[in-house]
Amino acid sequence: MIRRLVSTLLAGLLCAAMAFTAALADQPETLTRDSGAPVGDNQNSMTAGPKGPVLLQDTHLIEKLQRFDRERIPERVVHARGTAAFGEFVSSGDHSDLTRAALLSAEGKKTPVLVSFSTVIHPAGSPETLRDPRGFAVKFYTEEGNWDLVGNNLPVFFIRDAMKFPDMVHSLKPSPVTNLQDPNRFFDFFSHQPESTHMLTQLYTDLGTPASYRKMDGNGVHAFKMVNAKGDVKYVKFQWRSRQGIENLDLDQVREVQGQNFNHLTQDLYEAIEAGDFPSWDLLVQVKSPETLDDFDYDPLDATKIWPDVPFRKLGTMTLNAVPNNFFQVTEQAAFAPSRMVPGIEASEDRLLQGRLFSYADTQFHRLGPNNQQLPVNRPHSAVRNHNQDGFMSMIERTGDVNYEPSRKLALAEDTQHRQVPLALSGETQQRGIERTRNFSQAGEFYRSLDETGRANLIRNLAADLGQVKDHETKHIMLSYFYKADAGYGRLITQAVDGDLAVVRGLAAKLSD
């Protein structure tokens, strides 16, 4: 009797323990920092109010970006497959009403430049035929220091907050288990990021496989600020418009080219320059006054958005006319960072840009060392005067015992006229997403702007990857994003990957733009 009672009690305890274990299994474990401290928000950077910049005190963001920047030695984590060329930018006029940047102060003013074209995700030596955003980075060697305008061929990006940048790249890179790039992984990530719908729609058109670097536009992607001598502030977006037109490869052409020459973009650019067929681009800018930023039904500082109804103004023309004498010394050692700006050009409160201001320069510190700006390809054409010193590979001879400021022994001090413009703030520190998301509308507008061939190629290209996704929920969430952008778009891609249209419609109905 007692033995039976004990057995019953033990069985009951075992069932209870199993139920408790199962309940625990359903509860996600808490994300932590490397120190073991729990993370309170891994989706949003800490900002100074709803419209303010990202705060340096967001130590989780800083640590996350620092760790991410140091994952590869010595290859770039992103933009590893690149091609650079030298050239010249000529200002089309006096743009001092818009900015006090010296390179835009007079018609005909010339500024030397270095341009780096690249793929974003794929490693050095990978085929240039692979689908990928294309980096379009320009270093202006101005009389006021270097200005790096670091962008892509597409006008938008996958995410709007730098907090998610390491996660996004991890999902797009090869699996740490199989070392293979896997649509199951990156669509799993993007199914949690509805703002990626616009970028994915653009990337899976033939824009994702350009036929020539010369026949490709460039975009600054982010909003920046331009400030004139009076202190007047304008928010701007930059675009490089190819004078050679646009030419892309469809999927059949990609396969044909890849079988013949997977270095076609570099070869095309270098052969054209060496033959004297110098490619050129017009630099255009869109301009908005600060008081008009609330006129949009979306956040205009969101990197997943374009400004479709804002006119363009031409600032000048860039021409590439010289191939580097040494690929490594120029292309591999070129260090671009959006934090390198000149007086009259400043960062906006764009949350993705705010993270890149730190991350890109920090990457170069890790990859090339603290004195990377002393390398010939990065060295400013203007004088450098500061008390930064020593470190690995320091190449500047420094004299005197004054390596601090201020000092009565050395007349070297800041010039207050170059202070950045103040930004009025209100509210409290926060970790919340932006309010005006509009995740799907611009993706739909872009889809409807495509011709019949463009739409067909988009569906074909996208289906080739999305069709590999095995998880039913992930696939149908992604399909619902495309359906929310445009019902015809969603219906066609659902059919192409054998999805359930009823499920897609049901999920889309629950989405708000």
Image (cartoon, helix red, strand yellow):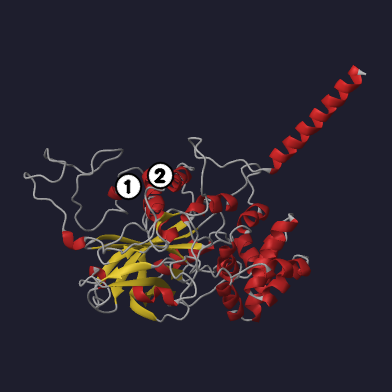
The quarter holding residue 485 reads bottom right
Residue 393 in the image, given as x and y percentages of width and height: 30, 40
Query: Which is nearer the N-term, disc 2 or disc 1?
Result: 2
The answer to which of 188 and 459 lies nearer the viewer is 188
Examine the rendered structure and indicate whether residue 319 appears above or below residue 422. Answer: below
Residue 189 x, y percent position in the rendering: 61, 54
Q: Quadrant of residue 99?
A: bottom left
Residue 372's label in the rendered image is 1
| Point 20% across, 61% down: residue | 418
Q: Rounded to the nearest whole Å, what is the CA distance between mark 2 and mark 1?
A: 9 Å
Q: In the displayed image of the protein, which residue is found farthest to the top?
A: 2
Residue 126 is at least partly visible in this image: yes
Q: Residue at x 46, y 56 (%)?
A: 82
Check whether the beta carbons of the residues at disc 2 and disc 1 lie within 8 A of each other.
yes
Q: Which structural element holds mark 1?
A: helix
Local packing at callout 2 (Cα closer than 10 Å; few below 14, some 14-19, many 20+) is many
Q: Nearer the viewer, residue 59 or 402?
A: 59
Instruction: Name the quadrant of the C terminus.
Output: bottom right
Locate residue 263, reporting x and y percent. Answer: 53, 59
- Taking depth in this image into account, of 247 and 136 the one nearest to the observer is 136
Q: Is residue 251 above or below residue 181?
A: below
Do we see residue 80 in this rendering? no
Which residue bears the numbered disc 2? 367
What amino acid type should be assigned to the residue bearing mark 2?
Arg
Mark 1: which amino acid? Asn
Residue 449 at x, y percent in the picture: 58, 80
**In the image, is 13 to the left or to the right of 355?**
right
Report whether 77 appears left or right of 396. right
Q: Quadrant of the N terminus?
A: top right
Q: Does residue 146 lie above or below 329 as drawn?
A: below
Counting other residues with Cα less than 10 Å from the Cα at mark 1, is it few (<14), some (14-19), or many (20 or more)?
Answer: many
Outermost residue, left side:
408
